Image: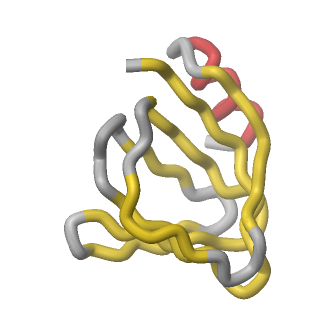
Amino acid sequence: MNQSEFEADLRREGYQVFYGGLRANEVNLDHTHDWHARVMVIGGEITITRNGKAETFHVGDSCAVAAGETHAEHVGAQGVAYIAGRRAV
């Protein structure tokens, strides 16, 4: 799925769409969100750790994080840019 298709899919499923990014090597320790999230990487990379399992996402990769799901984020050396969707619980 390309970026345009991903964004259209988010809107179709009722997600609020926004673009964002994080700085190189930024780390966000275990945390949760009050919303469901879907993210597609459009630049750089990010590693998300859930239940002790780390998974790295590169350009074109996407993932979903459910509301209340504990996860940590570690941004790659070049930072990360993404398109994201948030949907209330």
Residue plotted at (68% across, 22% down): 8
Front residue of 86/56: it is 86
Front residue of 87/6: it is 87
Q: Where is residue 58 in the image (x, y as percent from the top left)?
A: 62, 69
- Colour scheme used in the picture? secondary structure
50 w.r.t. 3: above or below: below
Residue plotted at (54% across, 13% down): 14
Numbered-mark total = 0
Q: In this view, does 65 lie to the left or right of 74?
A: left
Residue plotted at (75% across, 79% down): 24
69 w.r.t. 55: above or below: above
Where, by quadrant of the figure, is residue 64 drawn?
top left
Q: Where is residue 59 in the image (x, y as percent from the top left)?
A: 68, 64
Q: Is residue 68 left or right of residue 12?
A: left
Where, by quadrant of the figure, is residue 44 drawn?
bottom right
Where, by quadrant of the figure, is residue 67 drawn?
top left
View extreme (left): residue? 51
Q: Where is residue 49 in the image (x, y as percent from the top left)?
A: 36, 70
Q: In which quarter of the image is the C terminus?
A: top left
43 w.r.t. 38: above or below: below
Residue plotted at (63% across, 17% down): 11
Front residue of 55/66: it is 66
View extreme (bottom): residue? 77
Q: In this view, does 32 lie to the left or right of 57?
A: left
Q: Quadrant of the N terminus?
A: top right
Q: Is residue 76 left or right of residue 53?
A: right
Front residue of 49/12: it is 49
Q: Where is residue 19 in the image (x, y as percent from the top left)?
A: 78, 41
